[in-house]
Amino acid sequence: MPAADLQDPALYGATLEIDLAALRTNYRRILTELDGTPSAVVCKADGYGLGSEKAARAFWDAGARVFFVAQPAEAIRLRESLPLEAEIHVLNGAPPGAERAFRDNRLIPVLNALGDIERWRGYCRDRETPLPCDIHVDTGMLRLGLPPGELARIEADPGLVDGLDVRLVISHLACADELGHAKNTEQLAAFRQARQVLPMGRACFANSSGCFLGPDYRFDLGRPGVALYGVNPRPEGPNPMSPVVRLTARILQVRRVDAPETVGYGASYRVGNPARIATVPVGYADGYLRSISNRGHAMLAGHEVPVVGRVSMDLTTFDVSGVPEELAQPGAEVELLGSAVTADDLAAAAGTIGYEILTSLGSRYRRVYVG
Ligand SMILES: *Cc1c(COP(=O)(O)O)cnc(C)c1O
């Protein structure tokens, strides 16, 4: 069977549309916010679930030249879809034995500990070439990066970082999405101190929300991820970013309910009055999280339709009683994600964050790139 058959839209009940023009707009929006400071882009986790090759290419077209992913294998895949001048940085660093792949694919490891630094220096020394790298200083995340004690050792013995070609010195904010959080200023002060010890290369600090914390947080290079993909980096205010994803599905079946009945697994929702329930072919296996059960809503012909009953693996049921009957028929298009129901909205319903909604989007959709 030719794979081309899989392109036939008739085979799919749901379509995930990804707007590449919106990705470019969002990159420019970040640059505007940074007011002259350049910005890298984070494309980890397959471009926050939206397709890292397409996304990275869109950012490249909008002028991005510095790219971050989390894992070496992600970086090798990305290398193939970007021009050689693109800098690809790997947040999780180069595991022992991966140094050669980094060199061959021109990948830049983020060195997260003194041990990483020693190993990379050793590798470079053996080859008599200082290969590019970054140094990550932990300023309060306690996740990755040089802890204060290791930074102090470098301060006492600067020779520990001799012979390295350090491109970026980075750190990562824990609470950037909370404007007045004391942790932000603490981390800022710690990062400035770290720059006294490690003044080489460019300083790169702000994630998406950090880019909106003002000039002090910009340093030499922004490092946003989620905002580029349309999630609100300033949760207290209106979203300055453009929506990137649109998820639509066609109603499979509409069930009339004339007497009180329950819907779905666990009989968790009781339909009282005469009602109409529409079943849509998207479920938790597609990243429409089970925690949306009885909480989220979608749009049908301009009407909000609530999720009723539990989201199951392949299907979700909506109460469409409020929609004129002729508009709520099998084949009608329900919008599960878009400008009316954003990833942030769905996340709020599910008790999670927009990041998780995007990175959970499944592989069964017909994926369409527009713009
Ligand atoms: C994921 C990540 C980013 C991007 O963060 P967003 O909140 O998505 O903007 C930046 N830096 C590091 C170290 C990360 O892990």
Image (tube, rainbow, N blue to C red):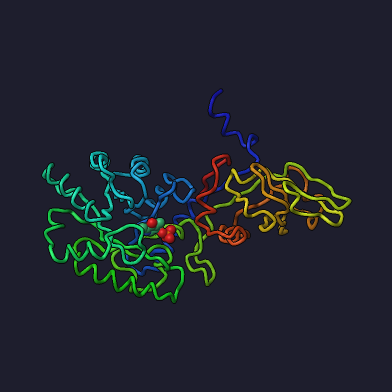
- Residue drawn at the location 54% of the way across and 47% of the way down: 361
**Residue 272 at x, y = what percent?**
84, 57
Q: Is residue 25 visible?
A: no
**Residue shown at the point (65%, 40%) measured from the top left:** 13
Q: Is residue 112 left or right of residue 292?
A: left
Residue furthest to the top in view is: 1
**Rendered-image quadrant of the N terminus:** top right
Q: What residue is at 58 percent from the left and 60 percent from the top?
A: 351
Residue 170 percent across, percent down from the top left: 29, 61
Q: Is residue 281 something that shows in the picture?
A: yes
* Relative image position of residue 84 (x, y in whole percent): 28, 44
Q: Is residue 11 left or right of residue 266?
A: left
The mark tally for this picture is 0
Please indicate whether residue 280 sits to the left or right of residue 159 in the image: right
Tell which of 254 and 360 is nearer to you.
360
Q: Where is 138 relative to 291, above or below?
A: below
Identify whether 9 is placed above or below 292.
Answer: above
Please tell me which residue is depicted at 49% across the width and 48% down the height of the picture.
50
Q: Quadrant of ligand 1?
A: bottom left
| Quadrant assignment, res 222 | bottom left
Q: Residue furthest right?
A: 259
Q: Position of residue 336 (x, y in %)?
A: 64, 52
